[in-house]
Image: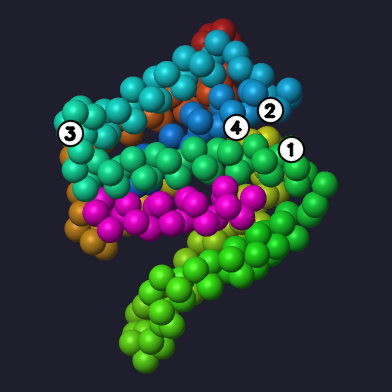
């Protein structure tokens, strides 16, 4: 679980975001839900693959391709490799959600969150020292420290307690639908704080991805159909 849900995706996303914006990375991260639908259908009998989920996934993949751009599919650049890294991270996340549902469902969410983060730290710390040497703590600025605190406590530790609780209640494929919400905040923060605006093509791709995710979930369309029948 540590490898699939922490070490592999965290490393790939951190590397990819050196080249692409947080907003774009968050949109590409929506592919997690599409990967989770197929992987969950293989390993979790209670989450079968039906026509609605297949159609939603295919629409979402079209949106992901639009976000990446056809140019990235025909030539290899640092930006395209960064986007590929994010997509590989989403597959790892999807595998992690299925592994958590099938192998860790008997444990409490707080225990899983604590255990995975502690084990991940034990594994990664020696690798980091061997690769980059002992960090120079004197170089840590207060701004950098506050960012680390925000990412580690709010964005990871607290978030994972909620993550595993939702996994327990809703299942792997439903859990990954949260990726429809993440891009909204990421793109907004990028624009407001960093003045990084996404292109019209990326925005269009996100709209298509959102449509695919809403079809996989089905509840919005069920409510619309219910109201239309009531009229």
Tell me the distance, in whole angstroms, between the alpha carbons under discs 1 and 4. 13 Å
Furthest toward the bottom, the residue is 138
Along the polypeptide, which appears first: circle 2 or circle 1? 2
The answer to whether residue 168 is left or right of residue 204 is right
Examine the rendered structure and indicate whether residue 102 appears above or below residue 73.
Answer: below
Which residue is under mark 4? 173
> In the displayed structure, would residue 22 be above or below residue 179?
below
Badge nearest the viewer, 1 or 4: 1
Residues at circles 2 and 1 in contact by the CB criterion of under 8 Å: yes
Q: Identify the residue position indicated by label 2 in the image.
A: 43
Left or right of 46, for residue 28: left
Which residue is at the front of the view, 128 or 88? 128
Q: Which of 220 and 159 is in front in this view?
A: 159
Q: Can residue 99 be seen in this view?
A: yes
Q: Is mark 2 on a helix, strand or loop?
A: helix
Can residue 152 be seen at all in this image of the molecule?
Answer: no
Would you call the spot at circle 3 few (<14 residues within 10 Å), some (14-19), or many (20 or more)?
few
Horizontal side of residue 117 vs 81, given as left or right: right
Where does label 1 land, which residue? 102
Residue at disc 1, secondary structure: helix
Please tell me the numbered disc located at residue 75: 3
**137 is higher (above) or lower (below) than 82:** below
């Amino acid at each position: 679980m540590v490898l699939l849900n922490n070490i592999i995706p965290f490393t790939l996303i951190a590397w990819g975001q050196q080249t692409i914006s947080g907003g774009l990375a968050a949109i590409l991260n929506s592919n997690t839900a599409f990967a989770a639908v197929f992987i969950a259908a293989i390993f979790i009998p209670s989450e079968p693959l039906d026509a609605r989920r297949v159609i939603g996934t295919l629409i979402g993949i079209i949106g992901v391709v639009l976000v990446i751009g056809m140019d990235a599919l025909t030539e290899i650049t640092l930006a395209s490799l960064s986007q590929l890294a994010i997509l590989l991270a989403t597959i790892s996340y999807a595998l992690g959600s299925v592994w958590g549902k099938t192998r860790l469902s008997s444990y409490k969410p707080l225990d899983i969150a604590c255990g995975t983060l502690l084990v991940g730290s034990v594994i990664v710390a020696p690798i980091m020292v061997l690769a980059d040497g002992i960090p120079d703590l004197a170089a840590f600025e207060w701004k950098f420290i506050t960012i680390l605190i925000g990412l580690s406590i709010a964005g990871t530790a607290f978030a994972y307690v909620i993550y595993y609780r939702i996994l327990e209640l809703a299942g792997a494929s439903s859990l990954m639908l949260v990726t429809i919400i993440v891009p909204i905040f990421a793109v907004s923060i990028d624009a407001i704080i960093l003045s990084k605006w996404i292109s019209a093509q990326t925005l269009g791709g996100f709209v298509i991805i959102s449509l695919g995710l809403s079809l996989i979930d089905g509840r919005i369309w069920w409510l619309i159909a219910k109201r239309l029948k009531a009229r």
